[in-house]
Image (spheres, rainbow, N blue to C red):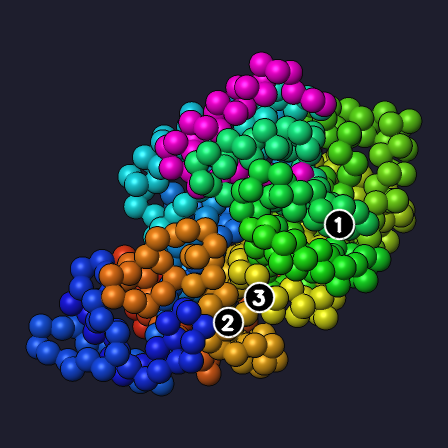
Amino acid sequence: MILLHNGIVVDGSGQPSQHGSVLIRDQTVESVGTIEATPDMEVVDCSNRVIAPGFIDVHSHADLEVMQHRPEKVMQGVTTEVVGNCGFSLFPTIPSSELVPAFEIFSGRGEKKWPDAAAYFEDLETSESRTNVAALTGHSTLRAGVSGMRAGKLETAEQREVEKRLSACLEQGSIGLSTGLNEVPSSYGDFDELVSLCQVVKRYDAFYTSHLRDYKFRILEAVEEALDLGRRTQVPVQISHLQAAGYKTWDKMDAVLELIDRASAEGVDVGIDAYPYLAGSAGLTQLLPIWSLEGGTRQLLQRLRDPDTRQRIAAETESGMANRWQDVLLATMTHPDQADLVGKTVQDIADERGCSGLAAALDLVLETQATVVIVSFNQSEENLRKVLSHPLTSIITDGLVTDGKPHPRTFGTYPTFLGEFVREKSWMSLEDAIYKVTGLPAQRFHLEREGLLRPGYHANITVFSAAEIGTQSNYEVPDCAPQGIEHVLVNGSWGVRQGQLQELFSGRPVRT
C-alpha cells in the first residue's frame, strides 16, 4: 500500500480542495481523507503539495511514442491519453506510406502495419506504455486505405468498405472516429459521408472528434457542420483544438462560442479542447489549397514544378493566409544541410533569398519533399483566455516529438497551463483547472473510473507543487524538463518519483 500523506487534495470534481491523504492499494484508490499511517504502508510526505488525479490528454498524437516508452507525457503529469486524432490513426492498414500526407505520426513506423485496432492494442500491451492509452480511428487513414488520395465522393462499394473497417475497429475497442477535415484525404469527405460514418459511431455509443474543415475565414461554417452532425446523428461531438487561426479572423471567436453554447443548450452533446499556447504546429502543406494535395506528395511536387499550376497554387495559398509569413516558424527540416533553417521564419528565408514569403514557402515544400513542420503563431491572448476558460473546454497537448525544434506543448502543456495561466495570470481557480485536465475529459470520453480521486477509481495520480509548477520550455528551446511535478502514479505504480525527471529523458537530450 502507498499512502500519499498530508497533502492538498484536489479531487478532479471542481469542488474546493481539502487537506488530507490518499491511500492506494494495488491499482486502485482505497480511501481519501484523514488516514493514519501504519507500518505496512509506503508513506510519501505530500505536505504543501497538491494531490490530484493524473492528467488526461484527450488529444494526443503520441500514437507511436506510447510504444517507444517515451517519458514526455508522464513527466508533465499525464497518466492517460487519447491517440488517433485529426483523422490520422496507425490503424487500419494503409497500402503505402506515399499515400499519407506529411504527417509526423507515421514517421519512424518503417514497414510496420496494423491491420486493425486489435493489432494496435496488442502491440501496445506488449510494449507496456508509460501511460494508459485509448485510441480513435482516423478518417484519413480509413479513406487512404480504401480509395487512396483520390478526391471526390466515394463509390458506394468504397463507402461500405470504409464503414465496415470503422465498425471493426470500434468493435475491437477504438473509442470513436476522428476527422481532419482540412487535411487530405479526410477533407474529401462530404457531409453525407460523415453522416453515414457517424451513424456507425452511434451504434457503438462512441465519439466523433473533428479537426474542423476550416479554422480561418470559414470557421463559423466549419463549426456549424460539426454541430449539425451531432444534431443529425445524436453522436457526441468534440471540437478539436478550437481557435480562430490568424489575426484576420480573431474577431470571429465570440460568434463561434455563441454557436457552441446555443447548440449545447439545445441538447447537442458537444465538447471543446484546446492547448494553452498562442501558436500551433502542422505541416507546411496545410497552408496549401486542398486540391493541390490530391494524389499524395509525388503529385503535389509535380504540380509545384509546373509554372502555371504553381501560379494557381500560389494565388490560392496567399488568399487563404490569415496571418503573415513572419508568423510561420520552421520547426523541423529533414535534410542535414537545412538544419540551419530551423528556428527561422518563412519571411526570414524569403529576405535571405530575395524573394516573397510565398515564393520561399513553396520552394521549401519542393526542396524538402513536403516534409517541413512549422510552428504558426495564430492566436490572440484574449481569444485563448476565452477558450481555455470556457466550461466545455478540456486542456490538451496536441503534441508529438519531432526533430529540430518541436512545439513546446509536447514537453510542457500542463505545467504551462497550471503555472502561467492558473497561478500567475489567475484565469481560473486551481480546482477548476484540475477539473479541466482530469474530471471533465474523463467524463467527456467515458473513461471509466478515471479523472477523480474516489474509492474504487484507478490509482492514476499526480502530485505537484502549485507554487513551483511550470517549465522553461519555449519555442526556441522546447525540450526542457518541467518543474514542480514530484510524483506520478499510473495504475498504482510509480511513473515518476521526486527528483527523477531528468533521468527519465532517454533517447533525447532534455534541458533543465
- The amino acid marked with disc number 3 is Pro
Task: Choose between 459 and 200: the one closer to the eye.
Answer: 200
Location of residue 9 in the rendering, given as x and y in whole percent from the top left corner: 35, 77
Q: Mark 1 and mark 2: span between their CA atoms?
A: 27 Å
- The amino acid marked with disc number 2 is Ala
Please tell me which of labels 1 and 2 falls first in the chain. 1
Q: Residue at x 39, y 47 (%)?
A: 133
* Camera-side mark, 3 or 2: 3
Residue of label 3:
391
Q: Residue at x 57, y 66 (%)?
A: 391
| Residue stretch rendered in magenta on the structure | 152-181
Task: Choose between 492 and 400: the one closer to the eye.
Answer: 492
Please tell me which of labels 3 and 2 falls first in the chain. 3
The numbered disc on residue 433 is 2
Task: Choose between 342 and 207: the one closer to the eye.
Answer: 207
Q: Residue at x 39, y 52 (%)?
A: 447
- The amino acid marked with disc number 1 is Ile
Location of residue 6 in the rendering, given as x and y in whole percent from the top left corner: 27, 83
Horizontal side of residue 327 vs 396, given as left or right: right
Q: Residues within 10 Å of mark 2 (few under 14, many from 20)?
A: many
Q: Residues within 10 Å of mark 3 (few under 14, many from 20)?
A: some
Q: Secondary structure at mark 1?
A: helix
Residue of label 1:
219
Q: Mark 1 and mark 3: span between their CA atoms?
A: 20 Å
* Camera-side mark, 1 or 3: 3
Question: Is 199 part of what is drawn in magenta?
Answer: no
Are the residues flagged by discs 1 and 2 in contact, CB closer than 8 Å?
A: no
Query: Is 112 rendered above or below residue 491?
Result: above
* Viewer can see residue 253: no
